[in-house]
Image (cartoon, helix red, strand yellow):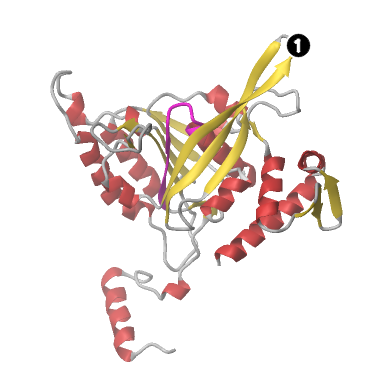
Amino acid sequence: MPLSDETRALMARISRKYGAGSVVLASKMPTVPRFTSGSLSLDVMLGGGWPGNQWNEILGAESSGKTTIVHKTIAANQERDPDFTTFWVAAEGYDHEWAATLGVDVDRVVVFETNAMEDAYTEMIKAAESRAVDAIVLDSYPALVADDEDAKNMDEATMASGARVTGRFFRKVGQATRRSLVEQERPLLALIVNQFRDQIGGWAPAGATPKTSPGGKAKNYAYYTRVEVSRTEWLDEKRPGGSVRVGQVIKLKTLKSKAAAPQQVASLRFYFADSAAGFRVGEYDTASQLVTQGILQGLIRLDGSWYKYGDYQWHGDKKMAAALREDLDLQEQLTDDVMTAARREMA
């Protein structure tokens, strides 16, 4: 249906005042860019990967795998794009050796070490404005100290000072993160790591501990996606001398998503040590993820204990996963089919 003369006049007036490309029809806008997380299950849960040009939060308890998720995300995008560069604000220090173990090319990561909140936010805004990097990471919010808090003595209260600064940051960073409505610009991946805190005086079901995320409520409105990370179990292997811990199962849940259905869940098997089963330190069990997603998307048929995909069939999920690990072409084919089916389901 053609636009009315009044609508055209409205658009023309806004364009004259704010510049070409400041107002467009929604149908002409570029699609939301996506960045892979390095995990098929997480990509499906997110609706195709992390949404670009928006701010995303990864939060959970300590040692649940939050920074690992970020490192694996950076490594996966570096593998896809040889020019992919990251600006990493390290409020808690940066372990470049562990990052390299997880597959990160640390020569393409610019690290700014500070726990001064205002300095961290200022440089994040400038990095977004510069278009000089492809990703901005803050790890992590709870380690930042606002100037107002830093200037006071240890026995002086500074309630909500960090939340006020954080709210101001999100109000100011929007313009820096925004990209053209009419042209495809270099997109930005923006990730902030946060950690749950016990909520004093809060309510929770019997046996549970009430929890909250520091930084105030304003940030929750600003985030495009919020992902909760938790550890559900350890991965132990029996050895001649006893049992050895080689990894953990990481559970992820979308608390908020403007790009896909919320309250979705994904599960990853991550190895932080070499496994007798053949997994190397820093790896996900990608084959098991493929089998699970293939079944969920209806691509893998179950016939008793047989797993069938196309002209292939295997007796049991373990044999199918083993075959996928050995046949990279088959692994790539099933991955493409899963993502195609997932996108069709979300359309």
Q: Residue 327 falls in which quadrant of the image?
A: top right
Q: Residue 343 falls in which quadrant of the image?
A: bottom right
Query: Compared with residue 211, is residue 244 higher up or lower down, i.e. above or below?
Result: above
Q: How many numbered marks, from 0 up?
A: 1
Residue 108 visible here: no
Pinpoint residue 142: horizontal percent, then vertical percent. Answer: 33, 30
Residue 143 visible here: yes
* Badge 1: residue crowd in 10 Å (few <14, some 14–19, many ≥20): few
The answer to whether residue 63 is magenta is yes
* Region rendered in magenta: 54-66
Look at the image and tell me in which quarter the N terminus lies.
Answer: bottom left
Pinpoint residue 290: horizontal percent, then vertical percent. Answer: 69, 47
Pinpoint residue 134: horizontal percent, then vertical percent. Answer: 49, 46
Q: Residue furthest front?
A: 206
Task: Provide the secondary structure element on which disc 1 rests.
Answer: loop
Three-letter code for the amino acid on which mark 1 is drawn: Pro
Query: Compared with residue 86, is residue 261 higher up or lower down, i.e. above or below?
Result: below
The answer to whether residue 343 is magenta is no
In the displayed structure, does residue 99 sit left or right of residue 310? left
Pinpoint residue 208: horizontal percent, then vertical percent. Answer: 37, 33
Residue drawn at the location 72% of the way across and 9% of the way down: 241
Residue drawn at the location 65% of the way across and 54% of the way down: 296
In the displayed structure, does residue 61 sit left or right of residue 77? left
Viewer-nearest residue: 28 or 345: 345
Circle 1 sits on which residue? 240
Query: Compared with residue 266, is residue 140 higher up or lower down, i.e. above or below?
Result: above
Viewer-nearest residue: 170 or 249: 249
Residue drawn at the location 53% of the way across and 25% of the way down: 96
Viewer-nearest residue: 72 or 316: 316
Viewer-nearest residue: 88 or 185: 88
